[in-house]
Image (cartoon, rainbow, N blue to C red):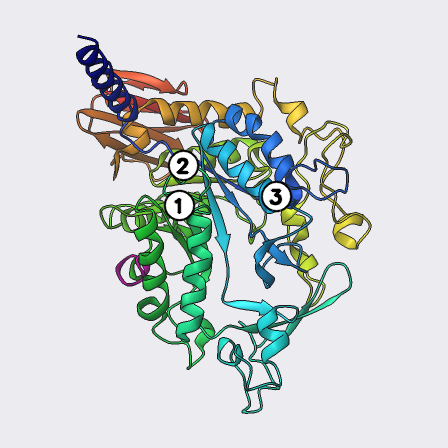
Amino acid sequence: MRKYSILLSLLIVQCLTSISQNANPYNTEIIYHVCQRSFFDSNGDLHGDLRGLKEKLPYLQELGVTSILLFPLHDADCYHNYFANDFEKIDPEFGTIEDYLSLVKEIHRRGMKVYMDMETQYVADKHIWWKEAVGNPASKYSDYLLFEDSAHTIPATIIADLRGLNSYDGNFIKITTVNLREKKVLDYNKKLFGFFTDPNGDGKFDDGVDGFRLDHAMDNLDGKPALRNLFRDFWKPLLDYVKQINPRLQNVAEQADWNDYGFTYFEQAGVDRMFGFGLRSAILSFDKKELIRAADTILVKCPEGRSQLIFLENHDLDRFASLEPDIRKQKSATVLMMLIGGIPSIYYGQEIGMLGKSVARGNTDGNDIPRREAFEWYKKNEGPGMAFWYKNTGEWWDKSNVKANDGISFEEQKAESSSLFIFYKQLIRLKKSNPALAGGKYANAVNDNDKVFSFYRTVGKRKVLVVVNLSGDSQKAIFQDKMKKSSPLFGKGIIQNHTIQLNPYEVIVMELK
């Protein structure tokens, strides 16, 4: 009797687990793209670190995001950690491998996901491949790098014929291109990516990433004749390999050409997700025709089983609040980013309206520091954890956008009902609570007003209409659908039969019955 009781209990547990896992079958994922060096400093050295990020996971869950996209973690002299000195070593300013594994496990314990930014196409002059191969054709690493001469004394340039760059702190960093056509390089990357997929090899993945962000991924890297057909010969074999380890990985590639919709990456490189650059441009244009055109391509034509990341900001772009100071337009654009479809990606500080534009001061990586400043936790800009790693290093510090008492801080916005932070929280909660907004298909909703953009999100019998006034004037739009049988979900537009009236930049979201 006891045996049957135990079996019955196990069956009940399995059923409850299955129900729990399938309670919301739609994609409610919302990514938070964080520069960990600028986020929260746990030890007082002014550098944001892994322990600091772990300490602030409750903040991210309060905001409502479900996933974290990290900047690169490997040891490098560049503050952004591209151009590695060592792919296998965590930057000591971030912490240790133990700190990293502890963070990943805690992220997973909270039901969240983590993605790692990887760029292994280039190395700096402190990397062992450079140190042993440059000037030494007999080195076992001789074929790991590209050279411009047979004596291997001139390492190949990167991107726009760069041989190095000036760091924000006054140092010069030499860099070169890795030979991705070399089988030993592919084998090395398989081991490297495989380690971060399942560090202890137990197949449980509680300590492994949920996917990789592939920076500057190209089929023909930087137009170099020696590096053609990389989708077929490098990226797909690599991604197929890590998917064999963990089939649930979701890998996203940043297309080098931001005008490229990325469909060839899906088809030839085995990538799961791409960045919707074209939709981002359309959102910022506040142009209805551009929005329809971009969404009809980037969302509607996205292959089944693939996804687009929809964003307003990232580490290579000026902060949206610096481009558009009108808070009404900031909120309208946020609605489009969050609800139009795909997977929303929030750049750290975007949710409180942080400011920042790149500066042009020659060949230095300091130019982009204004886009990557310390997260603003406090009203007075002072307090534990402020990650002012760039303090007293140049114009980016002297003219810092991080200022006291300007309304741009978590402390100032967390209890202010009309703040951008509260707006983000409300939108995220709405998206996650409604199946159509979470995972429904996008379709343009026709109306007669060129200043009013509207679209449907539909899944099964659930249909939601989102309407956005793109202008600074009040607008009225006539629709084919009757609005009488509808349930308002967000906003307060005036609805009468086929007609909706909206105030300047106003948004209304409703479920149609």
Which badge, 1 or 2, is on the more N-terminal residue?
1
- Say whether residue 340 is visible: yes
Which residue appears farthest toward the right when viewing the image? Answer: 392
Q: Quadrant of the C terminus?
A: top left
- Callout 3 environment at 10 Å: few (<14), some (14 to 19), or many (20+)? many
Q: CA distance from mark 2 to mark 3?
A: 27 Å
Residue 317 x, y percent position in the rendering: 55, 52
In this rendering, the label closer to the viewer, 2 or 3: 3
Position above or below: 66 against 96: above
497 horizontally vs 169: left or right: left
Amino acid tagged 3: Gln
According to the picture, the residue beneath numbered tag 2 turns out to be 336
- Which residue, given by chain and number where applicable, does mark 3 sit on? 36
Using the image as rendered, state which of residue 270 and residue 298 is in the foreground.
Answer: 270
Say which amino acid is labelled 1.
Leu
Circle 3 SS class: helix
Dot label at residue 285: none
The residue sitting at 27% across, 32% down in the picture is: 457
Q: Earlier in the sequence, mark 3 or mark 1?
A: 3
Asked which quadrant contains residue 420, the reply is top right
- Dots 2 and 3: beta carbons under 8 Å? no
Of pointers 2 and 3, the one earlier in the residue sequence: 3
User: Start and end of the magenta stretch?
Assistant: 265-270
Tell which of 467 and 192 is nearer to you. 192
The kind of secondary structure element at disc 1 is strand
Q: Secondary structure at mark 2?
A: helix
> Where residue 303 sits: x, y (%)?
24, 50
Residue at the (52%, 35%) spot, across then down: 330
What residue did someone put label 1 on? Answer: 309
